[in-house]
């Protein structure tokens, strides 16, 4: 019986030793705590911000800060970012979806503020565009095929027409797909994202390019996206107000309104 206090002490030591392990039970969820996408440039804006034709979003994922596209006008982009408390110097990567000016026009203003970045762009961009980036001292990574560009972060590779790449984040809830204009078609892009990673899409954010597309077709797109596993949707930029209304009906509470100043997290 004299051994009893010793046994109790041993049990206590063991329990105390394991407490830190229990605390780290779910490292993935902890790690994803600060992850979010903030819209910094869009055709629509919350009050206090400037709206303009184009798209840019700040992606915060796994301690990486990526600017997805740059909008059309650098001054508007920097102004919106300032109001959101985003320091251009906090950006390490810029991901350009495609060459159109409403997605690339703001790049130079960002590079003037912070040339210490790596720019991922479709390899079909003209040489003088790439040289101009090098002129700021920034790095260029040319994209052709689908690939993992940072840990858990992929590009779809360039898709035609136009030669557009979309960004894929591999999260614990499924894939997050960020698109610029979706010129290749939003369903095709999501299908490719799933083929590359072997996982289901969870959230799709960006321009879907559905101006003037008949209601029946937009509903069919919503159905196809749901079939691909998409649970949450944030249509922006060139999606068009009619298509946005239809997506809002189709996805109900999982529809997230876009516009400068809006944020989506997971
Ligand atoms: Zn566009
Ligand atoms: Zn475009």
Image (cartoon, helix red, strand yellow):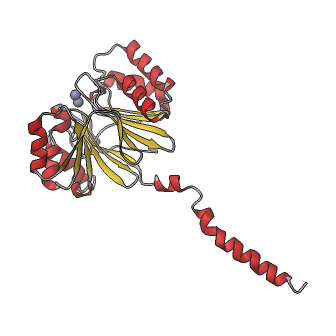
Q: Residue furthest bottom?
A: 2
User: Is 123 placed left or right of 241 in the picture?
Assistant: left
Image point 43% across, 18% down: which residue? 219
Report which quarter residue 144 is drawn in.
top left
Residue 207 vertical position relative to residue 20 in the rendered view, above or below: above
Residue 6 vertical position relative to residue 78 in the rendered view, above or below: below
Image point 75% across, 78% down: which residue? 10
Give x and y (percent) for residue 53. Answer: 20, 33
Q: Residue furthest right?
A: 1
Image point 31% across, 21% down: which residue? 210
Q: Quadrant of ligand 2?
A: top left
Give x and y (percent) for residue 251. Answer: 47, 28
Report which quarter residue 115 is drawn in.
bottom left
Give x and y (percent) for residue 17. Answer: 65, 72
Give x and y (percent) for residue 173. Answer: 51, 41
Number of numbered discs visible in the structure rendering: 0
- Specify the quadrant that holds the N terminus: bottom right
Q: Please state which of residues 214 and 8 is positioned toward the viewer in this rendering.
A: 8
């Amino acid at each position: 019986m004299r051994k009893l206090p010793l046994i109790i002490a041993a049990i206590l030591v063991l329990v105390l030793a394991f407490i830190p392990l229990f605390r780290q039970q779910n490292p993935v969820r902890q790690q994803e705590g600060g992850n979010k996408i903030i819209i910094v440039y869009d055709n629509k804006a919350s009050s206090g911000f400037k709206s303009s034709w184009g798209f840019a979003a700040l992606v915060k994922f796994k301690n990486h800060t990526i600017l997805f596209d740059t909008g059309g006008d650098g001054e508007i982009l920097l102004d919106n970012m300032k109001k959101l408390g985003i320091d251009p110097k906090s950006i390490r990567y810029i991901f350009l979806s495609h060459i159109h000016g409403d997605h690339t026009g703001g790049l130079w203003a960002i590079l003037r503020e912070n040339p210490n970045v790596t720019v991922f762009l479709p390899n079909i961009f003209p040489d003088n565009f790439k040289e101009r980036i090098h002129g700021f001292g920034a790095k260029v990574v040319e994209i052709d095929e689908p690939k993992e560009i940072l840990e858990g972060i992929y590009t779809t590779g360039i898709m035609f027409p136009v030669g557009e790449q979309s960004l894929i984040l591999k999260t614990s809830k499924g894939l997050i797909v960020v698109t610029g204009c979706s010129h290749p078609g939003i369903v095709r892009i999501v299908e490719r994202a799933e083929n590359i990673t072997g996982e289901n899409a969870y959230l799709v954010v960006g321009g879907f390019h559905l101006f003037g597309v008949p209601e029946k077709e937009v509903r069919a797109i919503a159905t196809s996206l749901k079939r691909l596993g998409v649970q949450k949707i944030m249509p922006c930029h060139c999606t068009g107000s009619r298509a946005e209304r239809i997506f809002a009906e189709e996805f109900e509470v999982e529809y997230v309104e876009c516009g400068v100043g809006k944020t989506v997290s997971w």
